[in-house]
Amino acid sequence: MKWTKTKPIKLILVLALTFSLINGCAKPEPVVQESIDLDPVKQELLNDINSLAEINDFEGLSVSAYWVSIHSHFRAPLNINDLIRFDRGGFHLEGNEIKGKLELFSQIEMNDIQLARIGNFENARYYLVIESDKDGKLFELLLFNGWSNMSINGVEIEPSKKILDAIYPLLTPGARYELRKYSKWF
């Protein structure tokens, strides 16, 4: 057998073709999809929050906030009714006073909501509620003394700066000042 210059080239081409065919038949790497958080509680809460940004009719809509200083001391922990009764600086907005102040709620995403299971619903210090004459309470935010978790529509979640930023346009200067005392969250 006579070795010529074309035989090494043919051998290299045959080997390259063989490796190409073998690699083409190999099993593809499995595609790993990130798990989608389909927690129905989180999904419902997110839907409730996002729907605030879709409100176009402000007739019969109101926003109220009540608070006591996080530095105030009481004999027993406060619940929402106590908080409303002891309120020293709350405010109330109605109808068109709310217009243009709910858009940031559309930016809340699933990863901005982390459910918490501590159950610390005592010692309420800050309460904000958005209500509709027709549909009742649409949004309830409850903050507690000690910078613990927050409650949104009765669901305890870990502190969310994005949710607090969304309510910020609704607040009066006094309500903003009091909310800033929860500076750990900002």
Image (cartoon, grey):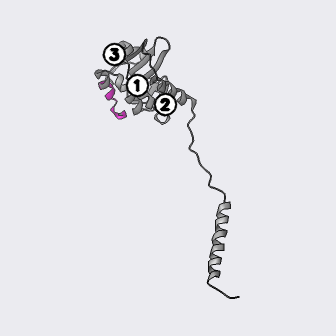
Residue most toward the bottom? Answer: 2
Say which quarter of the image contains residue 124: top left
Mark positioned earlier in the residue sequence (1 or 3):
3
Q: Tag 3: Cα neighbours inside 10 Å, few (<14), some, or many (≥20)? A: some
Please tell me whether mark 3 sits on a helix, a strand or a loop: strand
Q: Would residue 186 appear left or right of 46 to someone viewing this image?
A: left
Q: Tag 2: Cα neighbours inside 10 Å, few (<14), some, or many (≥20)? A: few
Mark positioned earlier in the residue sequence (2 or 1):
2
Question: How far apart, in angstroms, are the residues tagged by discs 3 and 2?
Answer: 30 Å
In the image, residue 104 above or below residue 18: above
In the image, residue 46 above or below residue 78: below
Q: Give the image location of residue 167, x and y in percent.
A: 38, 25
User: Which residue is identified by label 3?
Assistant: 91
Image quadrant containing the C terminus: top left
Q: Which mark is residue 143?
A: 1
Residue 46 magenta-drawn?
no
**Badges 3 and 2: C-beta atoms under 8 Å apart?**
no
Which residue appears at 35% of the width and 14% of the height? Answer: 86
User: Which residue is identified by label 2?
Assistant: 118
Q: Give the image location of residue 16, x and y in percent.
A: 63, 71
Q: Please tell me whether the stretch drawn in magenta is mainly helix, strand or loop.
A: helix
Q: Would residue 4 appear left or right of 176 to someone viewing this image?
A: right
Residue stretch rendered in magenta on the structure: 177-185
Residue most toward the right? Answer: 1
